[in-house]
């Protein structure tokens, strides 16, 4: 389905929806110059049986964030997540001591380079709405994808709900399930490019980023599809062929950025060091960088880390809940990602010169460490 029937709605803000007696809390816009329009879309691939359920064709849900000049923007509130997803995610987070009702309370309000986003294993794309909005505010169309049967819960417009958890984290050394899931995710990503009419011309090349398992999916998508010019893995262990086969071809070089967390880098994670060695050994990888944010943790990079500050509940969280998001304020993580990711993508797409932050030379980011590249 083309981004057709749903009219793009221009939004100024992400807002908290009144839930019971609780007042709405506005979410800030991205730090970039553009406001954002948001569309949720279903995409069905009639040519591909769902690899997790052959009884129906593969269909995925996406959220599309488009930059809009502020002068053309009128604001509207829309839910941060649809209701079933919000209820399921509430239950999951309640187990870690997060207050219930958080998700249900949030609402959101030219030709750009296309950036696809893939979320963590068994987690929803909505957990990165705000990160997607941040990148979009710097002038990218960002499309975040759910991957049914892998994503914990996916809600379709007709009311169908597909639960996830079908992908097994490696136990007893077998990575077969995660490797299969990465191939499925990469196909989902290529399918989105197909549907958007992205061809093989240099001008049309796309980029992809992902958090956790979604970062590994970004690398796999690049390896499988030369239409992707560059990718970012935000703190995700790598699996599969990207460990042994390098990205890029002679005619279509590719670029990659690793964004790790404190204690997780190519110096500590064998999958990252092997991936880095593969990047390093390739003549067709024309740019590569590895960064880390001091004191960051794996969960620093998902929306929860900024939503707790906006909702003003960080101090009330249980110790376990605090451990998940770590000590770096969400606002800071978004400032960093809003600067480094767009700079990297624009440079790789040859839209602008290499930003000095990419050379580790910006005094405004003393907490961002250039580890390699
Ligand atoms: C496969 O999809 C069908 C709907 O097309 C659903 O009824 C069925 O429960 C699914 N099976 C599994 C194992 O998820
Ligand atoms: C997926 O997430 C759900 C909810 O947190 C959990 O119950 C389930 O065990 C997870 N499945 C896997 C395979 O991790
Ligand atoms: C891993 O191996 C142990 C011992 O052989 C077995 O009990 C367990 O079920 C296996 N786990 C998985 C996920 O295959
Ligand atoms: C990569 O190559 C090593 C040997 O060099 C092999 O042990 C490993 O299984 C390979 N991994 C993948 C994912 O192909
Ligand atoms: C990268 O490649 C260079 C040249 O082949 C080599 O000297 C260096 O050791 C490699 N570094 C890593 C981290 O693999």
Image (cartoon, rainbow, N blue to C red):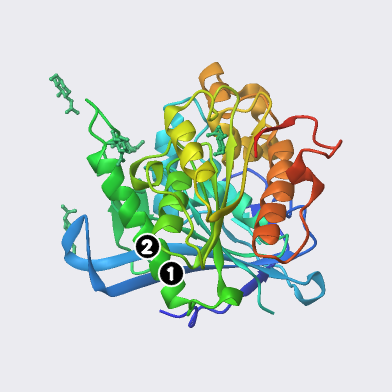
Marking on residue 368: none
Q: Does residue 164 appear in this view?
A: no
Marking on residue 188: 2
Q: CA distance from mark 1 to mark 2?
A: 6 Å
Image point (66%, 50%), residue name: 341
Judge whether 120 appears above or below 8 on screen: above
Ligand 3 resides in the quarter of the picture at top left
Dividing the picture into quadrants, the one containing residue 322 is top right
Assess disc 2: are there few (<14), some (14-19) or many (≥20) residues with their C-alpha within 10 Å of its C-alpha: many
Q: Position of residue 118 (x, y in %)?
A: 47, 52
Question: Left or right: 361 with respect to 162?
Answer: right
Q: Position of residue 182 (x, y in %)?
A: 34, 49
Tell which of 46 and 331 is nearer to you: 46
Q: Quadrant of the C terminus?
A: top right
Judge whether 107 appears above or below 332 on screen: below
Image point (71%, 49%), residue name: 338
Question: Left or right: 123 with respect to 353?
Answer: left
Label 1 with label 2: CB-CB less than 8 Å? yes
Secondary structure of the residue carrying tag 2 is helix
Q: Does residue 15 appear in this view?
A: yes
Q: Position of residue 33 (x, y in %)?
A: 80, 62
Marking on residue 192: 1
């Amino acid at each position: 389905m083309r981004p057709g029937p749903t009219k793009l709605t221009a939004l100024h803000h992400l807002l908290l929806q009144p839930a019971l007696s609780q007042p709405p809390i506005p979410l800030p816009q991205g730090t970039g110059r553009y406001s954002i329009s948001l569309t949720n879309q279903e995409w069905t691939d009639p040519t591909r049986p769902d690899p997790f359920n052959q009884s129906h064709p593969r269909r995925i849900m996406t959220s599309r964030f488009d930059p809009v000049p502020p002068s053309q923007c009128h604001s509207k509130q829309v839910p941060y997540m649809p209701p079933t997803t919000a209820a399921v995610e509430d239950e999951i987070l309640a187990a870690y001591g997060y207050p219930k009702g958080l998700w249900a309370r949030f609402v959101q309000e030219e030709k750009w380079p296309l950036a696809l986003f893939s979320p963590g294993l068994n987690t929803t794309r909505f957990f990165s709405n705000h990160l997607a909005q941040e990148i979009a505010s710097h002038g990218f169309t960002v499309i975040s994808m759910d991957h049914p049967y892998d994503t914990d819960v996916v809600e379709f417009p007709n009311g169908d709900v597909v639960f996830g958890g079908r992908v097994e984290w490696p136990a007893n050394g077998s990575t077969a399930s995660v490797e299969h899931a990465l191939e499925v995710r990469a196909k989902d990503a290529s399918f989105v490019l197909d549907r958007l009419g992205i061809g093989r011309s240099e001008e049309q090349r796309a980029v992809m980023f992902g958090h956790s398992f979604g970062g590994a999916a970004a690398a796999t998508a690049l390896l499988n599809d030369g239409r992707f010019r560059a990718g970012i893995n935000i703190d995700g262990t790598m699996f599969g062929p990207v460990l042994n086969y390098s990205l890029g071809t002679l005619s279509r070089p590719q670029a990659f950025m690793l964004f790790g967390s404190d204690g997780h880098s190519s110096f500590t994670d064998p999958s990252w060091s092997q991936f880095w060695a593969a990047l390093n050994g390739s003549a067709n990888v024309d740019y590569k960088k590895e960064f880390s944010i001091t004191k960051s943790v794996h969960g620093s990079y998902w929306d929860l880390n900024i939503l707790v500050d906006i909702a003003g509940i960080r101090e009330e969280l249980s110790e376990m809940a605090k451990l998940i998001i770590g000590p770096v304020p969400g606002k800071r993580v978004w400032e960093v990602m809003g600067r480094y990711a767009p700079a990297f993508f624009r440079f790789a797409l040859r839209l602008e010169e290499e930003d000095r932050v990419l050379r580790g030379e910006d005094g405004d980011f003393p907490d961002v460490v250039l580890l390699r590249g």
